[in-house]
Amino acid sequence: MAEPRRLTDVELEGALRDLGPRYPYPPTPNLAAAVRRRIVARPVMPVRRLALWRDPRRLALAAAAVLVLAGAAALINPTTRNAIAHFFHVPGVIVSRVSPLPSLSPVTPLDLGRRTTMADAQSTVSFPIAVPSSLGTPDAVYVDSGLPGGEVALAYMPRPGIPLVKQTGLGVLITEFRGDLIPGFLTKEVGPSTTLEETSVNGNPGWWIAGAPHVVVTRIGEMDYPVSLRMAANTLIWEHGGVTYRIESGLSKADAFRIAAGLP
Amino acid sequence: MEGRPLDDLALVERARTGDVNAYEALVQQYQQLAYRVAYQVTRDAADAEDAAQEAFVNAYYALGRFRAGAPFKPWLCRIVANEARNRRMAAHRRTALAERAHQAQASGEAAPSPEAAAEAGEFRAALVETLGRLREDDRLILSYRLFFDFSEADMAEALKVPKGTVKSRLSRALSRLRAALPADFQLPSGGAQWLSLGA
């Protein structure tokens, strides 16, 4: 019996073009009203962060100008440092005070990459994965190879002493990535009711972000849109040896520091 | 219904200044496309709705990073597809049931009476089913080109790939679709005449 003739590219394209208008989509919902309710009428100013990071001269000039302004403003208002916080960054992280915060669903998918084993994660990322001794082996390991150097996420389920975090569905989430390779990867958008504290973790510059949930925007390279955007809980974030570490949990600052003590 | 690029530019510029009405007009124009792009990724009506809505909210707050004068449609679709991927990865596999329900409904709608039409309905249902088994990026590139009639430049922008690679990716997606079709898959009677080939 003769083999049935396979469709040519032209025939297949024709079949798909014919299918297009007849494709059995569910009816399109009216999204406009819901979107309108969730956005806030405010000017959206162009952002030129990445260009600034790439031009050391402009960056130096901007930093100098900011330091002068910061010094003057701090004399007037002790909270001023928060307002310009995005200029004093941990590599890979930009922290911005924004008001009001974007209105997001409190719980959105984490998009941590693919679930895998610790050994596979270690062979995927370009830095030694650090596991905090106080928490032990993670309940799940995720790796994302789609960004320079890769990113690993260690997930710990809630347990006595480690409360459930609504935003992540986990107890503790630790992420590690090469912040030195992706200067603007994480942007933390912090609203007025979130505490933002410049801190030192194991002798490295860091941030403690706590209180009202903040928005995390992840972005790679020149992409001009947020790769993902979600609400996050209390976060301790710092950099050591080119790797940026991030602990997200519902824990207090002291408890978060205890976990961080087992990391670089 | 999609807007013309010039209308889009004006609406985007107004939305950047905080004009919510202008942004709402953009949502109205692109919600069907956004929803369908999301559906091609998620294969689930509720996830597609959530992803499209979330993408429009995210896109609004990202307008400051939108390159002035660039086409809005592929930029939006990139955000939609990304949101939809997030949803798909997180979602439990509810899709098969929903897909079957839609197909059953569709095949019911698509068979008026003549035999040729019934055959065409079966042909399309088989194509829909096979597309559903493809990798999401193959389904997306085929949809952009052949369902939504994107230009190569818009496809490159929506997929964030170099323009020069769009054709080869499309060709590979077609090959994988062909390989995934049932071995006895044939054009319906009347074949080339029935399909609007070469259009």
Image (cartoon, coloured by chain):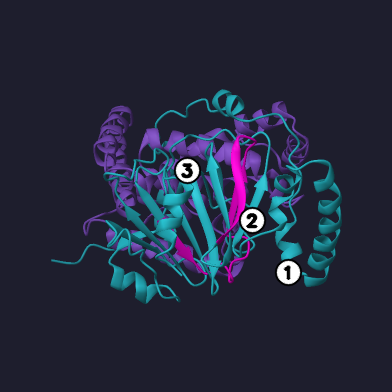
Q: Residue at x 48, y 37 (%)?
A: B35
- Residue A125 horizontal/vertical position (percent): 42, 73
Vertical order, A77 against B78 (above or below): above
Q: Amino acid at mark 1?
A: Arg
Chain shown purple: that is B
Q: Which residue is mark 2?
A: A94
Crowd around label 2: few <14 · some 14–19 · many ≥20 (10 Å):
many
Chain of the residue that carries numbered disc 3 in the rendered image: A
Query: What's the mark number on residue A54?
Result: 1
Chain letter, colour cyan in render: A
Q: How busy is the neighbourhood of tag 1: few (under 14 within 10 Å), some, or many (20 plus)?
A: few
Instruction: Give, as a single range, the part of the protein colored magenta.
Output: A174-200
x and y, in percent, of residue B13 in the image: 77, 39
Chain ID at mark 2: A
Q: Position of residue A99 (x, y in %)?
A: 68, 36
Q: Earlier in the sequence, mark 1 or mark 2?
A: 1
Alpha carbon separation for disc pair 3 and 1: 31 Å
Output the chain of dot 1: A
Q: For mark 3, what is the residue? A: A233
